[in-house]
Amino acid sequence: MAEVRAKKHLGQHFLTDKNIAERIVNGLVHTDQYHQVLEVGPGMGILSDFLLARKDLETFLIDIDLESIAFLDKKYPQLGNRLISGDFLKLDLATIFPGKFAVIGNFPYNISSQILFKILEHKDSIVEMVGMFQKEVAERCASKSGSKEYGILSVLIQAYYDIDYLFTVKPGTFNPPPKVNSGVIRLSRNQVAALPCDEKLFWRTVKAGFNQRRKTLRNALSGTIPKDRMDHHAFFDKRAEQLTVDDFVTLTQHLSELMQH
């Protein structure tokens, strides 16, 4: 079979190391909670080989690259309509997965944040995600309050998912090699069905706080609530990176009360 060419505009770096591919697939551990998995950007199917060998999973593949789709269609004729030609970011996931499912992939680095936000959008259906990202993105997702890496994605992901940084992958295991190391993380949906606060306001507060991360929250949140309505709550004198996820929940509850007065 002819090989698929990696396309720069799609941010493709094909993994060539089967041991690493197997380790990524073995990262799916919560299969008692779902039986369907969607692989995003399978390329030539190095992860798909291991996914399709698993009897506990029904595997779906989606790729935006028509050359990949043609290659995979020949390689896995058994997939039928479980091979999807399209853009994961635009896919209506609920029509394909009415129940719980998982997402896995060696994700294109240029859209990694959008992929993570899409997973958050479907947090009530996506029980688990195992993904390879640029190492600094993977570390940012897993970082804790007080660190420079800690930011919007860290808080929003950790509000709904437990996160494990699984391992680092060197550039030489890809074709073409990226210029940076990669990191594999696992997100496991936590027990929080919904946050005990106004979730829209929580998202707005987190984003506003980190968009001006050098400022205290009293200044950073002045677009959300006028300063003259803020009181002496200790969180207003801190910066966003100093607050844990639980702190942001508490702050959101407090903002809701202030806004009602």
Image: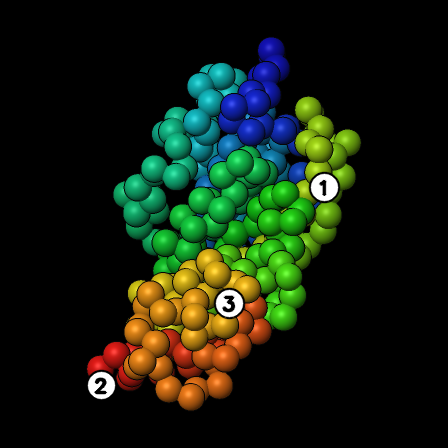
* Tag 2 residue: 261
Q: Quadrant of the N terminus?
A: top right
Q: Earlier in the sequence, mark 1 or mark 3?
A: 1
Mark 1 crowdedness (10 Å alpha carbons): few <14, some 14-19, many ≥20: some
Reading the chain from its start, which is encountered first: label 3 or label 2? Answer: 3
Give me the residue at 63% from left, 28% from top.
14
Taking the image as shown, residue 202 lies to the left or right of residue 134, namely left
Mark count: 3
Pinpoint residue 204: horizontal percent, then vertical percent.
36, 63
Name the spot of residue 87 as percent of width and height, x first.
39, 32
Residue 24: give x, y in percent of width and height: 64, 45
N-terminal of the two: label 2 or label 1?
Answer: 1
Q: Residue at x 59, y 16 (%)?
A: 5
Task: Identify the residue under disc 1.
Answer: 181
Front position in the image: 228 or 114: 228
State the separation of the CA atoms marked 3 and 2. 25 Å
What residue is pinned by disc 3?
Answer: 215
Q: Amino acid at mark 2?
A: His
Q: Residue at x 44, y 19 (%)?
A: 66
SS of the residue under disc 2: loop
The image shows residue 70 at horizontal and vertical percentages of 47, 17
Q: Is residue 108 visible?
A: yes
Name the residue type under label 1: Asn
